[in-house]
Image (tube, helix red, strand yellow):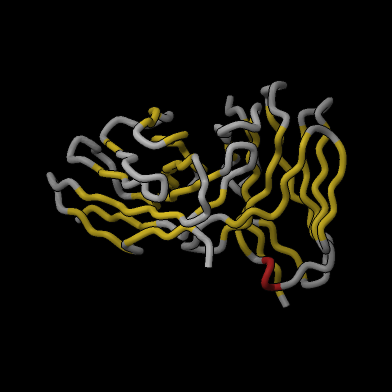
Amino acid sequence: QKEVEQDPGPLSVPEGAIVSLNCTYSNSAFQYFMWYRQYSRKGPELLMYTYSSGNKEDGRFTAQVDKSSKYISLFIRDSQPSDSATYLCAMSASISFQKLVFGTGTRLLVSP
Amino acid sequence: DGGITQSPKYLFRKEGQNVTLSCEQNLNHDAMYWYRQDPGQGLRLIYYSQIVNDFQKGDIAEGYSVSREKKESFPLTVTSAQKNPTAFYLCASSAAADTQYFGPGTRLTVL
């Protein structure tokens, strides 16, 4: 079993839809959680960075962490065609010189 | 203009050749990392360095080597011992109490 599980998709939605992307994990030591967006043939770009449980909002993006269920989510409101990309979740047990564990990524397609 | 640069963007290797991928950062980050990305497998850590002149193996270090002679630079050599080197290689860096930021990547293809 992988330490971090993420549905590869693709997830296809119409423009304006609310998108929910999810990861589950098995290591209860994880405390730091990230979401990266990666366009085709580009490096990952940090979207959201959260610590422990709770919600964090940044514009159209909301990150949610439920440590009791070992489940994290990224919500995208009013999705746009420019949101079409692969979304990677990542997590770490330590803040110092993090050894990140990544999900395999979910490919999102937003159609106009 | 701060950031992480990787060169070249595309690299082709013949069988038996060693090739070196460049990674430079001007963010004054202490730590630097190399990952390999293959379809359906996510990012896997090859090597990381927390300080100049020191580095540690990641999960898939066999067939790779690195050096960290300067804080700004962390080159990766893919040796002929790496049997399946075709992949997308990503360099990242981080400050001591922050997450990682990535460069644009180098796509390596074996001919």
Percent position of residue A69, x then y: 82, 28
In the rendered image, the residue lying farthest to the bottom is: A112
Quadrant of the rendered image containing residue B10: bottom left
Q: In screen coordinates, is B5 left or right of A48?
A: left
Residue placed furthest toward the top: A28
Q: Is residue B40 above or below residue B22?
A: above
Residue at x 23% of width, y 59% of height: B12
Q: Where does residue B62 sit, x and y in percent of width and height?
A: 30, 30
User: Is residue A17 left or right of B63 when viewed as pictured?
Assistant: right
Residue for point 35% across, 64% down = B9
Quadrant the N terminus of chain A occupies: top right
- Classify A87 as above or below A66: below
Residue at far left of view: B16
A21 over A103 or under it: above or below:
below
Q: Report the quarter where the C terminus of chain A lies.
A: bottom right
In terms of depth relative to the viewer, which is nearer, A104 or B23?
Answer: B23
Q: Is residue B53 left or right of residue A53?
A: left
Residue A55 location (% of width, % of height): 86, 44
| Along the viewing direction, whichever of A79 and A65 lies nearer the viewer | A65
Q: Quadrant of residue A28?
A: top right
